[in-house]
Amino acid sequence: MAIRFYERHGFVRVGRIPNGLLGHDTEIDELIMALRLE
């Protein structure tokens, strides 16, 4: 799953947009993920 891939590489979930992706008669929440650069 893509979420686990990003989390393994240091990304964290910072937000969620309810029903951010619409299509094919489905409503899917969109996750916002960020990676801190040092």
Image (tube, rainbow, N blue to C red):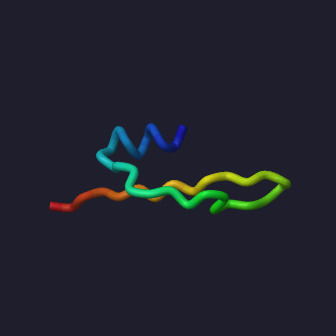
In this picture, is 12 found above or below 1? below
Which residue is at a point 78% across and 52% down the rendered structure image?
26
Q: Position of residue 34 (x, y in %)?
A: 35, 58
Q: Position of residue 3 (x, y in %)?
A: 48, 43
In the image: residue 7, left or right of residue 23:
left
In the image: residue 21, left or right of residue 2:
right
Which residue is at a point 51% across and 54% down the rendered structure image?
31
Residue 21 position by quadrant: bottom right
In the image: residue 10, left or right of residue 2:
left
Which residue is at the front of the view, 15 or 7? Answer: 15
Q: Position of residue 6 (x, y in %)?
A: 41, 46
In the image: residue 3, left or right of residue 14:
right
Residue 37 position by quadrant: bottom left
Which residue is at a point 63% across and 62% down the rendered structure image?
20
Quadrant of the rendering where the N terminus is positioned: top right
Q: Position of residue 27 (x, y in %)?
A: 73, 54
Quadrant of the rendering where the C terminus is positioned: bottom left
Which residue is at a point 41% across and 56% down the rendered structure image?
33
In this picture, is 1 found above or below 32? above
Residue lying furthest right: 25
Residue lying furthest front: 18
How many marks the image carries: the answer is 0
Which residue is at the front of the view, 5 or 20? Answer: 20
